[in-house]
Amino acid sequence: MRIGKYEVIVRHYMRYFLIAFLFGMLEFVIAQGLPASDSLTEFSASQWRTRTLQGTANIADSTTRVKIGSASLHFTTNSGDETLIFTPPNRDATWDISTIGKITFWLYAVNPNIGFQNNSPWVRLYSSEGNYLQLRPTYDLMNDARGTLLEIKIPLEGDEVWQSTIVGN
């Protein structure tokens, strides 16, 4: 499967700030044409974009909380609804993920309200618009990252924690 865009979707309650730090994003096991395991988080905020249904969202480089390498991504929003970050900005990646089995990253969240909802975070690996592999936890995993570093390991085929669904072709 070739993907053109990598997207993370987060849903949360109320209009409080969500601050998420992503560390060592996309640990791809040796595969042709994929970015190095830390290249998408190592001073690479310019390679990402944000979107939200309401409010604002921003992504920036950070050296405040770093698990792997010298930097992390710092995602901030005041939206009380769906927010997402995606890469590459032009949605034109040509990564062949057929030889990898999982995606791994570290997550730290600050959310002082009642929590996240709709089993966040969702990960979508697009092959084209409307065609993607969606990986979604079976519970609100983001709440486990509130105030602490949490390693996220997502098997592309899914498991007891992660549902794997192909949408479209």
Image (spheres, helix red, strand yellow):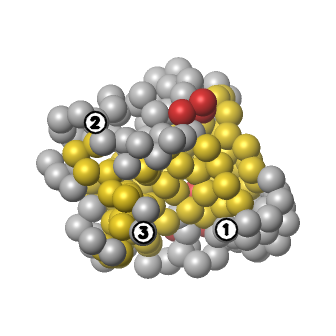
Q: Residues within 10 Å of mark 1 (few under 14, many from 20)?
A: some
Which SS class for mark 3? loop
Q: CA distance from mark 2 to mark 1?
A: 28 Å
Nearest-to-viewer mark from 3 and 1? 3
Question: What number of labels is visible?
Answer: 3
Where residue 46 appears, as percent x and y from the top left, is 60, 30
Q: Which mark is residue 53?
A: none
Q: Which residue: 64% across, 76% down?
A: 117
Spatial CA span between label 3 and label 2: 22 Å
The numbered mark, 3 or 1, whose residue comes first in the sequence reads: 1
Nearest to the observer: residue 25 or residue 143 = 25
Which residue does the numbered mark 3 point to in the structure image? 130
Q: Position of residue 18 (x, y in %)?
A: 74, 55
| Circle 2 residue | 34
Image quadrant in which you'd find residue 118: bottom right
**Quadrant occupied by the C terminus:** bottom left
Q: Is residue 43 above or below residue 41?
A: above
* Residue at image mark 1: 82
Mark closer to the chain start, 3 or 2? 2
Q: Nearer the viewer, residue 130 or 29?
A: 130
Q: Residue at x 80, y 65 (%)?
A: 54
Q: Say which amino acid is labelled 2.
A: Leu
Residue 109 location in percent, x, y?
65, 53
Q: Nearer the viewer, mark 3 or mark 2?
A: 3
Residue at position x 55%, y 68% in the image: 120
In the rendered structure, which amino acid carries the disc numbered 1?
A: Glu
| Amino acid type of the residue tagged 3 in the rendering | Gly
- In the image, is 94 to the left or to the right of 81? left
Picture quarter with the N terminus: bottom left
Question: Can you see residue 120?
Answer: yes
Q: Is residue 127 above or below residue 134?
A: above
